[in-house]
Amino acid sequence: MKKHNFYAGPSILPQFTIEKSIEGIRNFAGTGLSVLEISHRSKEFVACMNDTIALVKELLDVPRGYHVIFLGGGASLQFCMVPMNLMNHKSAYLVTGEWASKAFKEAKIFGEAIEVASSKDKNFSYLPKNYVIPSDADYFHITTNNTIYGTEIKEDPISPIPLVADMSSDIFSRPVDVSKYALIYAGAQKNLGPAGVTMVIIREDVLGKVERTIPTMLDYRTHIKAESMFNTPPVFAVFASQQTLLWLKEMGGVKVMQERNRQKAQILYEEIERNKLFVPTVTDPADRSLMNVCFVMAPEYKEFEAEFLDFAKSKGMVGIQGHRSVGGFRASLYNALPEESVKALVQVMKEFEAKK
Ligand SMILES: *Cc1c(COP(=O)(O)O)cnc(C)c1O
């Protein structure tokens, strides 16, 4: 039976990435060696790293004055690297979910971190509006897509102070005006590649302004200077990410992805609204994520939750159980997920409704 992969992360990758990864494991760039066993200093891997960086710059139209680096440690390491490198005394955070809360917690280690606004009062089911960004903070941190709660900031905000964004779960899903940001980071395992590598885009002029001593490995300048080769990079994860970027380019780029993602999300949200058994957890359609669609059983059908999960599973739906802090269901519709999978899920929802 065909499996439809709705996992939130690690998550579905293009079949192209899988095939090219297998090829690269067998014979990397015509070297006759596996990508798993070659020196990261070999000319073939250096070319792979440079090409991956160039593809990021091309696909996101990264302006001059910005650097793209690849690091280990996951997006979670960025929660502390950002304040360590950018925050002297004060920073500001928009607290819109669990990842945002974790980032905020780390910033407090380094000084005064201000919660500009939070949607915790309603279990992060909406995006705070009309907040004021303090002009005396060193930066303002947002999480553009709240993977667990299914809200997404779909327009690049305007900030009077340097803007920092965790884009782990919606990077490359739409065009981004990079010039509006001082720093963007994203763990690879949602929309880019396998777990193990994190992409960071940094505007040169925000660095070198803090008074503290930064450990070498945690200093962005180390990795910029060494072109992501200061120490052994996660070579396989970078190689696989390069394949996804090549696929993305072939598909027509982020604008095309945005159209596809809008279409996929619309099909699913429409069914959730129509189907008597389900309700969306994010009430305002403007706040709803195109990447992670969260929904629960309508109160009068609550008892059928486990039965629906089993039924969906029997039809090949994988990874639709909601995160434990929200419950219900979450279907992640990342770039690589075909519309066909969304339609298959909708079909399962209709069939289950007909049985009730
Ligand atoms: C998955 C995720 C993270 C955590 O990523 P790790 O690579 O596991 O540290 C952080 N932020 C967001 C928005 C995520 O979706």
Image (cartoon, rainbow, N blue to C red):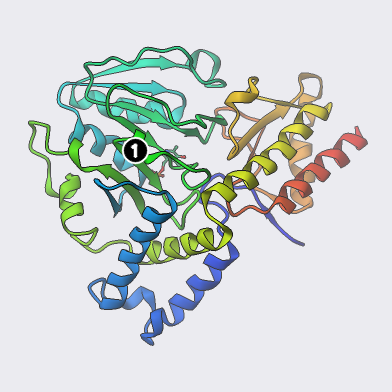
Q: Position of residue 217 (x, y in %)?
A: 17, 50
Toward which corner of the image does residue 164 lie, by quadrant? Answer: top left
Report whether the residue tagged 1 is closer than 8 Å to ligand 1: no
Q: Residue at x 80, y 44 (%)?
A: 311
304 above or below 172?
Answer: above
83 lies left or right of 101: left
Along the viewing direction, whichever of 69 and 251 lies nearer the viewer: 251
Q: Amino acid at mark 1?
A: Ser
Q: Residue at x 12, y 40 (%)?
A: 214
Counting labels gives 1
Toward which corner of the image does residue 233 lie, by quadrant? Answer: bottom left
For the C terminus, which image quadrant? top right
273 lies left or right of 88: right
Query: Which residue is tagged 1?
Result: 179
Q: Position of residue 346 (x, y in %)?
A: 79, 42
The residue positioned farthest toward the bottom in the image shown: 32
81 lies left or right of 254: left
Q: Position of residue 45 (x, y in %)?
A: 31, 72
Neighbor class of circle 1 (other Cα within 10 Å; few <14, some 14-19, many 20+) is: some
Q: Position of residue 73 (x, y in %)?
A: 31, 49
5 above or below 293?
Answer: below
Q: Residue at x 8, y 33 (%)?
A: 212
Along the viewing direction, whichever of 34 and 181 lies nearer the viewer: 181
134 lies left or right of 88: right
Q: Residue at x 55, y 47 (%)?
A: 255
Check disc 1 and report its element: helix, strand or loop: helix
For the N terminus, which image quadrant? bottom right
Q: Quadrant of ligand 1?
A: top left
